[in-house]
Amino acid sequence: MTRQVEWRIGDRPVDYPSAVTDMERRVAEIHAGRGRELVWLLEHPPVYTAGSSARPEDLLHAGRFPVYPTGRGGQYTYHGPGQRVAYVMLDLARRGRDVRAFVHGLEEWLILTLAEFNVRGERRPGRVGIWVDRGGGREDKIAAIGVRVRHWVTFHGVALNVDPTLEHFSGIVPCGIAGHGVTSLWDLGLTPTLAEVDAALIAAFPKVFPNPQG
């Protein structure tokens, strides 16, 4: 029997602590066999989150937005309106128990999604996330990745910049990587709606994460 992944799409920004509480509840349900795998697409109000490797000096404007420590991997990240956050709760016990392959899959999912808008998203060795070559030696980050795994169930996930206020990223060193910029689909001259981006994410997902059997 094939179990279908559940999709949830938020219709308004979700408070960050509430989202984490909801994720942790679903992770426990998946681990106990009482809940389906879930991909939750949402926005947050403006917020900085600090991953497990965050360095205090990378928070440049501490009082600008709320700052929340979070158990995901990575360093400081900005979330806000115009950014599509995708929280991915999958049962790796049924999907090969390979965290590196899971992260690689998240990267591929973003790359395939961006390709739907004729954007070439790329990996960079030593730099987490998905990058866009702007020419002239300039590379900008268009998507961030930060995950956590508990009892082989994944949570947290990815954040794709559709049309956020890019200046808000100036309050941190995004993901601890200095010397590079941040971009978005709208910054690149494309104007998809969040609904159009959601449709691309949903279409690309099973190409990378097919529903497991059993």
Image: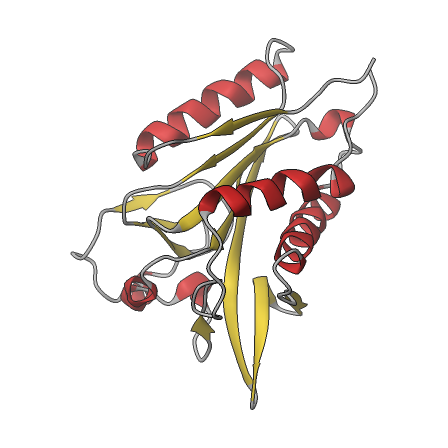
Q: Residue furthest top?
A: 34
Q: In which quarter of the view is residue 14 placed?
A: top left
Front-most of residues 6 and 170: 6
Front-most of residues 187 and 104: 187
Q: Position of residue 74 (x, y in %)?
A: 49, 54
Residue lying at 41% horizontally and 64% vertically, measured from the top left: 174
Front-most of residues 37 and 74: 37
Q: Is residue 155 visible?
A: no
Residue lying at 53% horizontally and 46% vertically, measured from the top left: 196
Q: Position of residue 192 (x, y in %)?
A: 49, 54
Q: In which quarter of the view is residue 206 placed?
A: top right
In this figure, which colouring scheme has been used for the structure?
A: secondary structure
Q: Position of residue 132 (x, y in %)?
A: 58, 71
- Vertical comparison of 87 with 174: above or below: above
Number of marks in the image? 0
Front-most of residues 29 and 120: 120
